[in-house]
Image (cartoon, grey):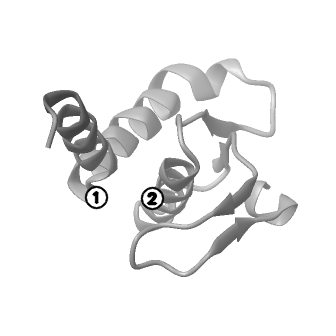
Amino acid sequence: MPRKKAAKALTRYLELHPVNIDQVVSVIVEHFRLYVLHELGGGPRLWSSPGRGLAAVKYKLTFDRYIKDNGYTGIRSLVAFSGTVEGPGRPRLVLHRGVHE
């Protein structure tokens, strides 16, 4: 495998690894709660814009799970992606308007 192609594959694997996503989501949510939430006048939402569709789906699901698991109320996640996502070993996922809200 060419070096550049291997580096891309490794980077994608690391970016989409569940442990990495869990840690990033934890930092984002806690920063939002501690430093941003009180600045907003209402309708607080976490906004994320991952680079790829599969990452968007994984981040959205992880945000929602983290918020629920920690019992946070008044916070909702919003991920900037719409369309169809197909991943290895995953069913075809389609994000609809309702998923974003």
Is residue 84 positioned above or below 49 on the image? below
Mark 2 → mark 1, Cα distance in angstroms: 9 Å
SS category of the residue bearing label 2? helix
Residue at left offset 41%, top offset 67%: 69
Residue kind at label 1, given as amino acid type:
Pro
| Tag in front: 2 or 1 | 1
SS category of the residue bearing label 1? helix
**Label 1 Cα neighbours within 10 Å, binned few <14 / some 14-19 / many ≥20:** some
Is residue 79 positioned above or below 65 on the image? above
- Quadrant assignment, res 34: top left
What percent of the width, then of the height, locates residue 3?
13, 30
- Quadrant assignment, res 41: top right
What percent of the width, then of the height, locates residue 62?
45, 58
**Where is the N terminus found, in terms of image quarters?**
top left
Q: Nearer the viewer, residue 29 or 24?
A: 24
The mark found on residue 62 in the picture is 2
Q: Nearer the viewer, residue 12 or 16?
A: 12
What percent of the width, then of the height, locates residue 44?
71, 37
The mark found on residue 18 in the picture is 1
Contact between marks 2 and 1 (CB within 8 A): the answer is yes
Residue at left offset 53%, top offset 37%: 50
Sequence order check: which comes first, mark 2 or mark 1?
A: 1
What percent of the width, then of the height, locates residue 32?
51, 30
**Where is the C terminus found, in terms of image quarters?**
bottom right
Residue kind at label 2, given as amino acid type:
Thr
Residue at left offset 49%, top offset 20%: 35
Residue at left offset 48%, top offset 63%: 71
* Apparent side of residue 51 relative to residue 7 in the rendered image (left or right): right
**Label 2 Cα neighbours within 10 Å, binned few <14 / some 14-19 / many ≥20:** some
